[in-house]
Image (cartoon, rainbow, N blue to C red):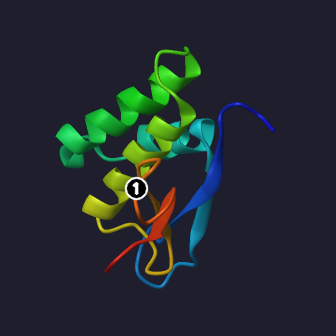
Amino acid sequence: MDRLQFEVPVRIMPAPGLPVEEIYSVEQALDFLQDWPKRRQGKVYEAAFNACFGATVDVASTEEACRAFAAFCRVSGLLARDAIFPGKRGSRAGTYREARA
């Protein structure tokens, strides 16, 4: 398994009426983030971008990047209703939990 591949893909719905997309890796997340409109970039976007970029240069883990990207998608209203949201290791819900819409 590629070290930059997410354990579970992040399922997003880019726009109403469009099919759900799955983001499988740090590279795909970075591609998506780089296309995000500047006027809609904020602190959560920056955290996701920095975590994903950090994973490519080994200063952040792939798990951290996945959590940050999923959080960005959730806050931005992109996370699919059936998505599994990464949780912290050792939490009572396990490694991943279902997103609550």
User: Residue 41: x, y in percent?
Assistant: 23, 42
Locate the C terminus and report the quarter of the image it occupies: bottom left
Furthest toward the bottom, the residue is: 17
User: Residue 71: x, y in percent?
Assistant: 34, 53
Residue 27's place in the image compared with 83, above or below, is: above
- Check disc 1: other Cα within 10 Å, few if <14, some if 14-19, many if 20+: few
- To which quarter of the image does residue 16 belong? bottom left
Residue 58's place in the image compared with 80, above or below, is: above
Seen at 52% across and 39% down, the residue is: 63
Residue 12 in view, yes or no: yes
Locate the N terminus and report the quarter of the image it occupies: top right
Q: How many marks?
A: 1
Seen at 65% across and 33% down, the residue is: 4
Q: Is residue 100 left or right of residue 69?
A: left
Residue 9's place in the image compared with 93, above or below, is: above
Q: Nearer the viewer, residue 97 or 46?
A: 97
User: Residue 91: x, y in percent?
Assistant: 40, 55
Seen at 61% across and 62% down, the residue is: 22
Q: Which residue is mark 1?
A: 91
- To which quarter of the image does residue 87 belong? bottom left
- Residue type at the position of mark 1: Ser
Seen at 58% across and 78% down, the residue is: 19
Residue 42 in view, yes or no: no
Residue 73's place in the image compared with 33, above or below, is: below
User: Residue 13: x, y in percent?
Assistant: 47, 72
Tell me the SS state at disc 1.
loop
